[in-house]
Image (cartoon, grey):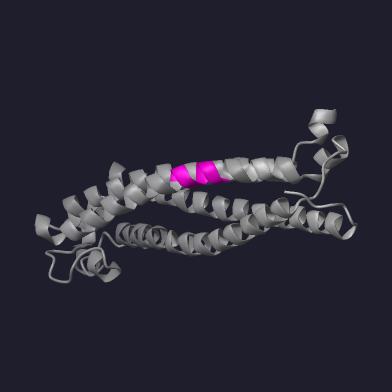
């Protein structure tokens, strides 16, 4: 019971949530980018030069994903260790603990870094909604085409243009899929897989934001406790 009383449960929950969110975002996001490149290459363009820039961008983003996964794995471990070090339950169990200047500086540093990461991941969370929105529009358009399939003249006017979303240059041919061609694309395994992967990556980004917010609350509380101990006159030492 003494050991369990020293566990920083908030930091532990945030760590598990962060690991799950990063795993979803990085794993699903990496595969979704690969599947997106395959969809664009197969159905929206005929010339390799039209999507070569997109292919390079996807490759760079995949390398960034590798770096994000490594960074957050280490950072979450460090934050969890900081939670163990500064939790009040540990201080009560081991009464010789003293508030230190280094400890307060360390907590302040974690608060600032985590706050910056929250802002950055809010942006990532917002950007990860763009491909979900694209595939949602595509699925809705295909649904409309299937409803209007008895009037071929009207369904040919229903299109999804990848150029409008910046995925292809404006001179790409054809750059879009229309009518029954688009409906057939929506029935492929690649479409459903890519759509589901982007939704999972979007959910993972949201979980990561929630985990970082939890970390911010936890580290701020730890810092407040250390400041309180300092004001009580407990001698600081490094």
Q: Is 217 part of what is drawn in magenta?
A: no
Q: Is residue 46 visible?
A: no
**Of all residues shown, which one is farthest toward the right?**
232
Of 13 and 4, nearer the camera is 4
Which segment is the magenta one? 69-75
Q: Is residue 30 visible?
A: yes
* Residue 73 drawn above or below residue 3: below
Residue 88, position in %: x, y? 82, 45
Residue 165, position in %: x, y? 29, 68
Residue 198, position in %: x, y? 41, 51
Most prominent secondary structure in the magenta stretch?
A: helix
Of 103 and 174, nearer the camera is 103
Of 20 and 79, nearer the camera is 79
Position of the N terminus by quadrant: top right
Residue 103, position in %: x, y? 71, 51
Q: Is residue 78 left or right of residue 86?
A: left
Q: Residue at x 61, y 61 (%)?
A: 112
Q: Is residue 13 left or right of residue 52?
A: right
Q: Residue at x 38, y 44 (%)?
A: 66
Total numbered badges shown on the rendered structure: 0
Q: Is 73 part of what is drawn in magenta?
A: yes
């Amino acid at each position: 019971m003494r050991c369990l009383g020293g566990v920083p449960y908030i930091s532990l929950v945030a760590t598990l949530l962060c690991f799950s969110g990063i795993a979803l975002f990085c794993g699903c996001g990496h595969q979704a980018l690969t599947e997106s490149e395959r969809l664009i290459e197969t159905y929206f363009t005929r010339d390799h030069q039209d999507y070569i820039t997109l292919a390079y961008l996807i490759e760079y983003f995949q390398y960034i994903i590798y770096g994000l996964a490594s960074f957050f794995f280490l950072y979450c471990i460090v934050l969890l260790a900081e939670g163990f070090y500064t939790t009040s339950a540990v201080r009560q169990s081991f009464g010789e603990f003293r508030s230190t200047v280094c400890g307060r500086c360390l907590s302040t540093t974690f608060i600032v870094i985590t706050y910056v990461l929250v802002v950055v991941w809010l942006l990532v969370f917002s950007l990860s909604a763009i491909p979900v929105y694209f595939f949602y529009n595509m699925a809705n358009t295909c649904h409309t085409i299937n409803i209007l399939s008895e009037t071929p003249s009207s369904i040919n006017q229903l299109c999804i243009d990848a150029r409008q979303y910046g995925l292809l240059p404006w001179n790409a041919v054809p750059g879009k899929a229309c009518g029954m061609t688009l409906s057939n694309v929506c029935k492929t395994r690649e479409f459903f897989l890519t759509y589901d992967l982007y939704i999972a990556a979007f959910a993972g980004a949201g979980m990561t934001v929630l985990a970082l917010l939890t970390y911010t609350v936890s580290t701020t509380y730890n810092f407040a406790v250390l400041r309180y101990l300092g004001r009580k006159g407990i001698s600081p030492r490094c």
